[in-house]
Image (cartoon, rainbow, N blue to C red):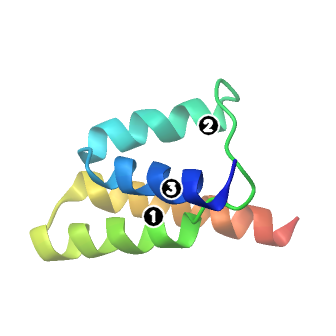
Amino acid sequence: MSKDDVTKLLKSLLQKDAIQVQAWLKTIWTGKEHISNNFNWHGLAQVAASRASENLNLEWAKVAIYVYNRVLYFSLK
């Protein structure tokens, strides 16, 4: 996946609602879909956390937590 493709994917995800992003994350974590190693996980987590904070939105908070946990897990491997 090229850098442009990764950027397009992130932009596409950020146009979805939190429930849709959670469903996408589930496909990644269950191995049904694979994602490039250069995907911007930090960017997704930061935007999700910001949306959660600005709107007091629990679903975006869940996205942020899920993604930060993934980043932490893979940084410890």
Q: Amino acid at mark 3?
A: Tyr
Nearest the viewer among 36 and 69 is: 36
Which mark is nearer the camera, 2 or 3?
Answer: 2
- Residue 31: x and y in percent read 70, 29
Cα distance in 3D space between marks 1 and 2: 14 Å
Mark nearer the N terminus (1 vs 3): 1
Q: Which mark is residue 60?
A: none
Q: Residue drawn 67% across and 44% down?
A: 35
- Residue 72: x and y in percent read 68, 69
The residue tagged 2 is 28
Q: Quadrant of residue 37?
A: bottom right
Cα distance in 3D space between marks 2 and 3: 12 Å
Task: Name the element at disc 2.
Answer: helix
Mark nearer the N terminus (2 vs 3): 2
Q: From the viewer's perspective, tell me whether residue 20 is left or right of residue 43.
A: left
The residue tagged 3 is 66
Q: Quadrant of residue 52?
A: bottom left
Q: Amino acid at mark 1?
A: Leu
